[in-house]
């Protein structure tokens, strides 16, 4: 059996979230999308379930993180080039997201961060592993 990763993220407005990620070029698996949840396809075997907050609450007894005050986790996605990092961040801002923090350039790795409309923290990075410092 292949391993798949499903991130589960609470959202306030499902349509707004779907529109945002669609504008960034992502697609949704409509077999797992309805009026309470949408299955964002990130990569092969990697998905994010965008769940309306009330539906998300049925999966946990804990409080939902207030993303204006706290970061529960970071989602980092790799891309093929430094230019693609910049392109995605430009698309994020155009789609209503927020560029977050200064770009980090380590020479062998380049990254930028953004907040989606619900305040979830995402990082986009390009990494040339052949140039990474050895330990």
Image (tube, rainbow, N blue to C red):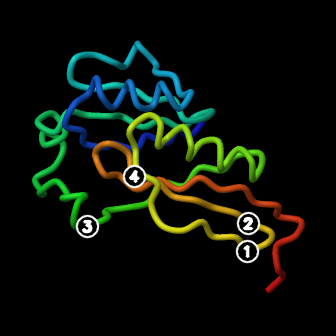
* Foreground of the two, 34 or 1: 34
Q: Name the residue under label 3.
A: 70
Q: Position of residue 115 (x, y in %)?
A: 39, 52
Dot 3: few (<14), some (14–19), or many (≥20) neighbours within 10 Å? Answer: few
Q: In this view, does 86 lie to the left or right of 56?
A: right
Q: Is residue 51 above or below residue 135?
A: above
Total numbered labels placed on residues in the image: 4
Q: Which mark is residue 60?
A: none
Closer to the chain start, of discs 2 and 3, is 3
Q: Residue 109 carries which label?
A: 2
Q: Mark 4 points at which residue?
A: 115
* Foreground of the two, 16 or 96: 96
* Foreground of the two, 133 or 3: 133
Circles 2 and 1 in contact, beta carbons < 8 Å: yes
Dot 1: few (<14), some (14–19), or many (≥20) neighbours within 10 Å? Answer: few
Q: Is mark 3 on a helix, strand or loop?
A: loop
Rounded to the nearest angstrom, the CA distance separating label 2 from label 3 is 26 Å
Task: Please report the residue visible at 53 percent of the width from the left and 56 percent of the height from the top.
Answer: 123
């Amino acid at each position: 059996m292949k391993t798949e990763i499903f991130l589960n993220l609470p959202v306030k407005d499902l349509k707004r979230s779907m529109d945002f990620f669609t504008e960034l070029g992502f697609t949704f698996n409509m077999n797992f999308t309805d009026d309470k949840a949408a299955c964002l396809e990130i990569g092969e075997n990697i998905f994010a379930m965008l769940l309306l907050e009330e539906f998300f609450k049925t999966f946990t007894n804990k409080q939902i993180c207030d993303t204006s005050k706290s970061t529960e986790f970071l989602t980092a996605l790799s891309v093929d080039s430094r230019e693609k990092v910049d392109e995605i961040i430009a698309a994020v801002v155009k789609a209503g997201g927020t560029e977050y923090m200064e770009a980090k350039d380590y020479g062998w790795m380049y990254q930028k961060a953004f907040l989606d409309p619900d305040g979830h923290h995402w990082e986009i990075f390009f990494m040339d592993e052949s140039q990474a410092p050895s330990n």
